[in-house]
Image: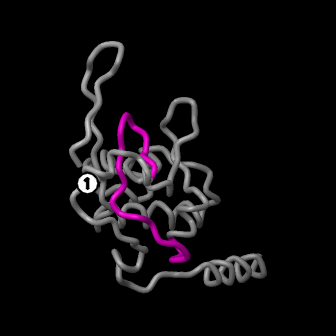
Amino acid sequence: MKYQKKCPCCGHVITAYTISMNKGLAETFYRFANYSINNGNNGLTKKDMELAGILKSHSQYTNFHNLQYFGIIHNKSENREVWFLTKKGEAFFYGEISLLNPVAVMENVSLEDNHEAWRTHKGKRIDINIRSILPFEYKRRPDYQAEKSRQTTLM
């Protein structure tokens, strides 16, 4: 993507760029979503994610925030340190929806599909789902619901 614009106030050049969902990002998302769903999606800090084994390296955390541009996680806390799984993220985790890959970002905002910056993008955008990136069997929504109902009957 080769799209730039100048700030009208100061002349600073602002550049749009793309982010692709790769295997490493998808694996981190999978661990985050799995943990969030099993623990009530109460939000996780970096420290929580490290303790839970979601983040295996520093680079995974530095890239983790890129998931927000796909709309599958969000940060709604005042100090911007707590991350939550979105409904869209949950549906992606369960394989119920696909995402367009890559996403375009400019000034920390995901660009709409009709933004003029996409005219400068050379590659094709494709629909991806969790299975196309991580081709392994994973639990579907009914499996989790069945587990939860078994847990409540045991108590």
Whether residue 142 is situated above or below residue 60 in the rendered picture: below
Residue 3 shown left or right of residue 54 in the figure: left
Badge 1: how crowded within 10 Å, few (<14), some, or many (20+)? some
Residue 118 shown left or right of residue 73 in the figure: left
* Residue under the point 44% across and 51% down: 114
Residue type at tag 1: His
* Residue under the point 32% across and 45% down: 117
Q: Nearer the viewer, residue 54 or 122?
A: 122
As for residue 43 lying within the magenta part, the answer is: no
* Residue under the point 27% across and 17% down: 11
Q: Nearer the viewer, residue 6 or 137?
A: 6
Residue 77 percent across, percent down from the top left: 57, 36
Q: Nearer the viewer, residue 139 or 111?
A: 111
- Image quadrant in which the C terminus is located: bottom right
Residues shaded magenta: 93-112
Q: Which residue is mark 1?
A: 121
Residue 42 percent across, percent down from the top left: 62, 51
As for residue 103 lying within the magenta part, the answer is: yes
